[in-house]
Image (cartoon, coloured by chain):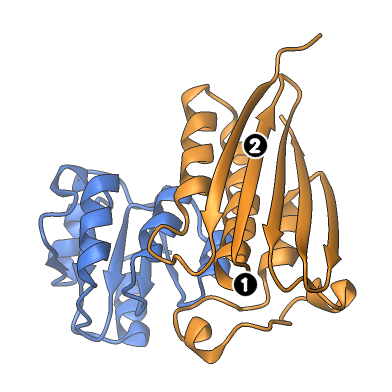
Chain colours: A blue, B orange
Amino acid sequence: MTLRGIVQKLDLIPLGGTGEQNLDKKVTGCYASDLLSDVMANSKEGNIWITLQIHANVIAVATLNDLTGIIFVNGRKPEQETLEKARDKNIPLFMSKLQTYELAGKMYQLGII
Amino acid sequence: MESTYVQEFKVIGGDFLRAGQVSTRIKSILKDIGINHSIVRRISICAYEAEMNVVMYAQRGKILFSMNPRKTHITVEDEGPGIEDIELAMREGYSTATSEMQEMGFGAGMGLPNIKKNADTFHISSVVGKGTKLQIGVMI
């Protein structure tokens, strides 16, 4: 499924003009974690990442792992620096009103595993 | 003699905003010259974890990245508190991170073990009160 498909089906809110040009990218899977080393070690290229961490270092993690995007849960809004770095590194950011468990469940139901 | 590419980067302790810049730079160098994906990934993980350790625990540090057609090498040397018990520091789950760092998702006690897992050669030495030195090698 493409990033666009996931955004539409899960009502994700795109943030601050980050990565619109990536919406046709294929999402290879999903990883949900708030520990950055865990994401470094276990996420896979093309994964979309569910987290509640909103500080700027998430962009380095997403860039290093070639993730297709980051979804902030619980309606959390990223810090300004996070948005700036995301634009710079072309990492799409989204917000979901759902919490991690619910969002991951819906993602799984979509066949994103 | 084989040609060797060498670049040195500085890392400032406590600078969480710029943290990750050096490893991102190293990754893009490797990607640009077309190094195999899984190798790039392993080096990226090593570089990131080592860089974050300097940011989290040391006053400052430098990362020396070198590469020849056979292998890459990352040496990370910091000025900081050093590590008292290296065996303990290498244990998965053990961390001396502050609760503030842990809230940010750092300090899971996975950094050094992650480096060791992804490196082909790994050496760590430390002097308490002076600093820590990591030597990480990954074959291309």
x, y percent for residue B54? 61, 63
Q: Choose the circle earlier in sequence order: 1 or 2.
A: 1
| B116, above or below B99, in the image | above
SS of the residue under disc 2: strand
Total marks shown come to: 2
| B50, above or below B62, in the image | below
Q: Residue B51 occupies which quadrant of the picture?
A: bottom right
Label 2: few (<14), some or many (≥20) within 10 Å? many
Residue B36, visible in the rendered structure: yes
Residue at 16% from the left image edge and 67% from the top image edge: A9
Residue B42, visible in the rendered structure: no
Residue at 34% from the left image edge and 72% from the top image edge: A55
**Front residue of A75 and B8:** B8
Q: Which numbered disc covers residue B57?
A: 1
Q: Which amino acid does label 1 sit on?
A: Tyr
x, y percent for residue B50? 64, 57
- How far is disc 1 from disc 2 in space, using C-alphas? 21 Å
What residue is pinned by disc 2? B65
**Front residue of A87 and A1:** A87
SS of the residue under disc 1: helix
x, y percent for residue B119? 76, 48
Residue at 51% from the left image edge and 81% from the top image edge: B101
| Residue lying farthest to the top in this orientation | B1
| A44, above or below B52, in the image | above
The numbered mark 2 sits on a residue in which chain? B
